[in-house]
Image (cartoon, rainbow, N blue to C red):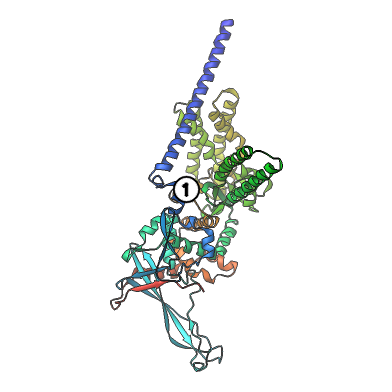
Amino acid sequence: MEKDLKIAKLQKKIEELKSRIEDDAVKIAHWKDLYFSEKDRRYGRKSESDSIPNDVQALLFDEMENAVESDTKESDPNFDNKEDNEKKTTVKAHSRAKGSRASLTVPSNSPVTDIYHDVEKTNCEACNAELTEIGEFVEEKITFVPARYVVVRHHRKQQRCLNCLPLEGTNKIITASMDNNLLTGTICEPSLLAHIIVHKMQFGLPLYRLEQKLVFPDKQKISRQLMSAWSITTYNKLKGLEKAFERAILKACMLNIDETTLLNIHSVKKSKVKLQYERDILKIQEDGKTQKLSDDTIISMVKERSELYQKENHNAMNCFMIVRAATNKDGSSGLVMFNYAEHRTNEYLSSFIGDYNGILQSDGLAGYASAAKDKSFTHLGCLIHSRRAAKNVLRASSKNKLAKELVDLYNSIFKKEKELREEYRSGEFTEEEYVNLRKDELTPMFETLNSWLLDKEDNYIFSPMMKKAIKYPLKRWDSLTKFMDYSFASSSNNMAEIKISNFVLGRKAFLFSNTVMGANSSAFYYSIVESCKALDVDPFIYITHILSNAGSAKSDEDWDNLLPSNVDLSKTKKYLDNIHSASPNPKREEPYILRGKKKR
């Protein structure tokens, strides 16, 4: 009897050691993955930061996200200078052009296209006589088409009253308006800024790379600072369109939501941490005087507070980009909305969701499930996130039979769901038939999965990772299976994961944001590009259109008509076709000198 007890104890100990070995293997794999991820981030070819000193990275990667907010507010948005000659001022690690006016000189044989603007016929304000056409005002801008630049000449008709010509102060000239163009007063044509935005947001090419790409004769170039200013200036003029995106996204019957990290050098959190640190240092010094503490004691307290500040300061730069991808009732994709956020606490997520009352599907972040208790929306979980813990166990130990069984159960559900969804999209079922059939097919499979999880939870000793793989779905069972009630919903949150992946890839190139305004403008332009892709609209044509026409939008209805799903792009396509067919003017001998207007 005693021998049997010893054998039982030894067997139990063996099981515990096996479990510990398995757990250690998972931990080793986890830390190994973190090590190689950090190594790739620092030294990988995509980051391009391994050869750059830390103290100059913020200067070298100065792009739209890195444009200093105060500079944008205080300086001329068109970057016009007071002199033609550039003045150089030396700053840390490089020389920067100070007050450089946006100007280019391009050869006379440059391709050129002409656009004509008519002015509405009006009467003279003084004598009410009909105005007479007297000529035109020619304004030259620059744009890029694939592999070449084109000079765009805007011919703006001019009128004035001939009756009032002899009277001083009454011969006012009226020029055809270009107020609809958000880039009026700059040398930038809307199609050029659209080219910049699409290459950055859609193709992940940061502005310091675009600066090298947009090269003009005599080694002239458009600086990344200038591209930043154009982008942020137009974003500030497109706030109405941003609100229109928000109104439309809240009307969607279903939203897939996800978030990813974003490093913001000058976040609001960081400012608050710095302010609190300064107050604490002053308090330490005042307390030291009143309590007559020694200098060494005060220095020690200040040093301790400074070390804590360094950690708080670093954490305060960790912000987030949140994406919401809309799905229509027929299952088609809707708008996509990116938002910059400095927190993702339960309170913040609850306020961010607001009064949305549709279907919200997310990953396993607890804030969404918590908000669903107090809000009117329905929350769905993600089955792929539920499977992830089991797959992590398999990565560490490919021979783990229990993890393999669990993954196979998940995979069988995904396979059957995909088959049914493809049949539904082919038109074999009505919406009601699809919902009922999917329930009939998947409910037994979910019951099998649930029974397996309950059986293993009560009767086996597992490593922490395997315990998580079992408890995660059991705690969220209702939210993981509720998708079967809606024809337009699926078991996974892949819709949001796919939309945010483009931002994640771009982040490897631009690395961080420098201001809140830069982060917000990036979020808005990512919203435009991803929405166009989801709605099968060409992002380049759409952005060119809104930059050319959004100046006329005044009411909410006007902005709603400029959404990608509502806008008519036929005129913009003709305009771009005209640019693509541009050719040099054989009679031109003088170079084109393009200058932005000075701020008045």
> What x and y, as percent, mark residue 476?
61, 38
Q: Which residue position holds label 1?
A: 504
Q: Quadrant of the N terminus?
A: top right
Q: Nearer the viewer, residue 267 or 553?
A: 267
Query: Does residue 568 appear in this view?
Result: no
Q: Nearer the viewer, residue 415 or 581?
A: 581
Q: Residue furthest right?
A: 290
Q: Is residue 531 above or below residue 192?
A: above
Q: Amino acid at mark 1?
A: Val
Kind of element beneath mark 1: helix
> What x and y, as percent, mark residue 599?
50, 72
Q: Nearer the viewer, residue 473 or 439?
A: 473
Query: Does residue 471 appear in this view?
Result: yes
> What x and y, as percent, mark residue 305?
61, 41
Query: Mark 1, residues whose alpha carbon is within 10 Å: few (<14), some, or many (≥20)?
Result: some
Q: Is residue 146 above or below residue 263?
A: below
> What x and y, as percent, mark residue 279?
65, 48
Q: Nearer the viewer, residue 377 or 550?
A: 550
| Total numbered labels | 1
**Residue at position x 43%, y 71% in the image:** 83
Q: Is residue 346 above or below residue 59?
A: above
Instruction: Name the quadrant containing residue 517.
Output: bottom right
